[in-house]
Image (cartoon, helix red, strand yellow):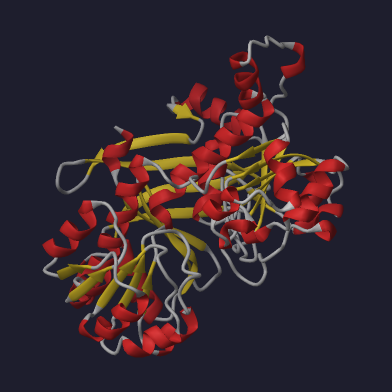
Amino acid sequence: MKILLIDTNHSILKAGLEKLGCICDEDYTSSKEKIEEKISNYNGIVIRSRFDIDQHFINKATNLKFIARVGAGIESIDVDYAKTKGIHLISSPEGNRNAVGEHALGMILSLFNNIKKADLEIRQGKWLREANRGIELEGKTVGIIGYGNMGKAFAKKLKGFDVEVICYDIKEGVGDENCKQVTLTELQEKATVLSLHTPFNELSYKMVNTSFISKFKKPFYLINTARGSAVVTNDLVEALINKKVLGACLDVLEYEKLSFENLFENDILPEAFSYLIKADNVLLSPHIAGWTVESKVKLAQVIVDKVQTTFFEENSIEEKTTTKRVTGIGGLFFKTENPTELKEWYKKHLDFNVDDYGCTFWWKNNNNKPASTQWSPFKSDTTYFSPSKKDFMFNYRVENLVDLLVQLKNEGVTIVGEMEAYEYGKFGWILDPEGNKIELWEPIDSAFL
């Protein structure tokens, strides 16, 4: 397979693709028109944000099997048209979701504690303690809109802060042990902090406007690490002035469609942007929420892994999934009115070694390697078992989740949501004929040792 790399990325991307047997060419300087002249020679293209992949480009790419974007979104690609041409689309939100979660948390903690303001004042010789008295995150309700990779990562970071975390998403059944899924109306009634983690689409475009803001029951803080186009800056500034929005953490801005260099070189700035850069209750960063040393490596590796799974292992899918699918019970999850009290009962009377998640039982697999099964009580109002109405859910250990989900889908099994990957393994969800939600887990047991 011949692949063209048109944006610079971590070296492990090219090395990983070449290890699979791919021939990789690099072209980081040619114009889009020049690349269109030769794209028919390639089976794959790896991009970041250099230019859009439109219908004209796709028509020139007569031998293209995949387009891979090293990043979370694929809005720079004409997705529908690419699919009509049978082109596989690959993105890598798994690679920078942790970085985004940490950045969002860091921004709101910095804003709450006046860290930027206080730092600048001290450098000017001002020691103002009372003027920089902060507020605490504990006890607040954090609302997340968009509960995919990024939203889930942020919710996970909020564990331990004693906050209520709720989310709204157009997909059903995305809530988990870290976050309760609610309606948009309920989120707007409860949230003190709102964090956006939506992709770019028609629904999210200019979503946060005056009408949207007015529906919040109480003043709130806004975090946007998603897309600048989701927030109408003029309306946000108006809300900041009238204190409907108490503060904002903005890693992205709607002005990103323009050149920031030109924006700063000219003396004429958008009036709303001028307000933001002077406001003490606004924290700005230059679209770097997913931009860490570690995420650069992860993003590249995710692309390599997905190319390998899609194009270099498909011939062995049937063999793998028919020889061994489920290898053991990974966990038993059930609802209870009071998980804390129940865990204490099991600890006292049955000697369960309980923690925040329940109890982990260790055993040896057929290869004499440490393996685990999790016992976990959930609150009775959890949405993690949705769309199942049952009070329990089983987790089964599997050997190759990606291939198994493909096989199950081909067999007509209902797949719930999308596969998710963490440092302790990959997870997928299906429904059995009685509507029971089943969690499938390809474990990395060593992560718990």
- The quadrant the N terminus occupies is bottom left
Q: Is residue 279 above or below residue 365?
A: above
Q: Please count the marks in the image.
A: 0
Residue 423 visible (yes or no): no
Residue 311 left/right relative to 215:
left
Residue 134, image x, y percentages: 71, 21
Nearer to me, 120 or 83: 120
Q: Is residue 233 above or below residue 34?
A: above
Residue 353 left/right relative to 328:
right
Residue 191 visible (yes or no): yes
Residue 185, image x, y percentages: 80, 57
- The quadrant the C terminus occupies is top left
Residue under the image location 45 percent in, 75 percent down: 77
Q: Quadrant of residue 121?
A: top right
Residue under the image location 38 percent in, 74 percent down: 89
Residue 378 left/right relative to 49:
right
Q: Is residue 122 above or below residue 177?
A: above
Residue under the image location 78 percent in, 41 percent down: 220
Residue 230, image x, y percentages: 66, 60
Nearer to me, 109 or 269: 269
Residue 74, image x, y percentages: 46, 68
Residue under the image location 40 percent in, 77 percent down: 409
Residue 81 left/right relative to 139:
left
Q: Quadrant of residue 232?
A: bottom right
